[in-house]
């Protein structure tokens, strides 16, 4: 493992990009704090154990990222018990498909809470911790839906559009105060449990560079966290090689 570089919090660590992000930042020498809903804490503890076995430092927390009280308490706990936050990554997805006639108010609200409101809470609490120190990086995971809607994804697209707007506003407000804010558009399918449960040819697509590897995406986040503070507003578009060319 690399020399210790401070604390990185990843909000939303599942079986794909989230755990790849946690491992990548741990490999860079960060003490990694990770969150997932409390009901999935046992799975998150497995990621924690894997990082520690590899020589890294990790802490798992069962948190509902939509809860203002829980998020405020999380940041307070990390700053008090683990160390000053240098990087915060918001990585909650909420990718669901419902036709507009089948999209209930509950579905629309829940998706917005997960993909947009929770991002606002994470970003706000990160800013409270980082601004007094005049340094830090806040990264938001976006999606194709952040920039264009698609049939069946009205709830998801509106939430991701909202998250992008939050990130843009934060970048312009916090950049002059030394905080680097970036929004990463993941414009393509990412290998993981969700994709493999919906597609039969994932290995062929990977071999053909037609879908994204979470480990490769994670390296882009690490690179963003190392950018000079002058690069305070940024949007990175990550897509499969074949689509990029």
Image (tube, grey):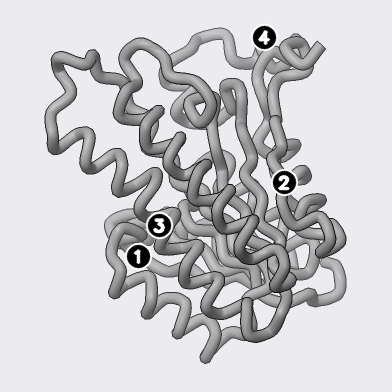
On screen, residue 183 above or below 229? above
Mark 2 / mark 4, whichever is N-terminal = 4
SS of the residue at dot 4?
helix
Q: Nearer the viewer, mark 2 or mark 1?
A: 2
SS of the residue at dot 2?
strand
Q: CA distance from mark 2 to mark 1?
A: 28 Å
Q: Position of residue 128 (x, y in %)?
A: 52, 78
- Residue linked to disc 4: 204
Residue at (45% x, 84% y) in the render: 76
The foreground one among 230 and 194 is: 230
Q: CA distance from mark 3 to mark 4?
A: 31 Å
> From where the camera sits, is residue 22 visible?
no
On screen, residue 24 above or below 58? above
Looking at the rendering, in which quadrant would you find the C terminus? Answer: top right
Q: CA distance from mark 4 to mark 1?
A: 36 Å
Q: Quadrant of residue 197?
A: top left
Q: Are marks 3 and 1 in contact (CB under 8 Å)?
A: yes
């Amino acid at each position: 493992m690399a020399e210790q570089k401070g604390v990185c919090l990843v909000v939303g660590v599942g079986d794909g990009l989230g755990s790849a992000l946690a491992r990548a930042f741990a490999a860079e020498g960060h003490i990694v704090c990770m969150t997932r809903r409390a009901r999935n804490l046992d799975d998150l503890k497995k990621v924690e154990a894997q990082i520690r076995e590899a020589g890294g430092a990790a802490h798992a927390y069962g948190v509902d990222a939509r809860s203002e009280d829980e998020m405020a308490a999380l940041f307070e706990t990390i700053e008090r018990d683990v160390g000053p936050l240098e990087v915060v990554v918001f990585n909650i997805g909420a990718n669901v498909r419902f036709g507009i006639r089948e999209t209930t108010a509950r579905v629309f609200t829940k998706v917005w809470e997960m993909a947009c409101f929770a991002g606002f809470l994470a970003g706000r609490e990160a800013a409270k911790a980082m601004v007094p120190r005049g340094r830090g990086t806040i990264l938001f995971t976006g999606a194709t839906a952040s920039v264009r809607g698609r049939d069946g994804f009205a709830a998801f697209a509106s939430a991701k559009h909202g998250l992008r707007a939050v990130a843009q506003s934060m970048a312009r407000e916090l950049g002059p105060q030394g905080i680097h804010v970036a929004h990463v558009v993941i414009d393509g399918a990412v290998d993981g449990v969700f994709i493999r449960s919906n597609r039969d040819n994932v290995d062929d697509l990977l071999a053909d560079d037609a879908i994204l590897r979470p480990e490769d995406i994670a390296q882009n986040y690490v690179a963003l966290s190392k950018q000079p503070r002058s690069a305070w507003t940024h949007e990175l578009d990550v897509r499969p090689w074949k689509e990029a060319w």
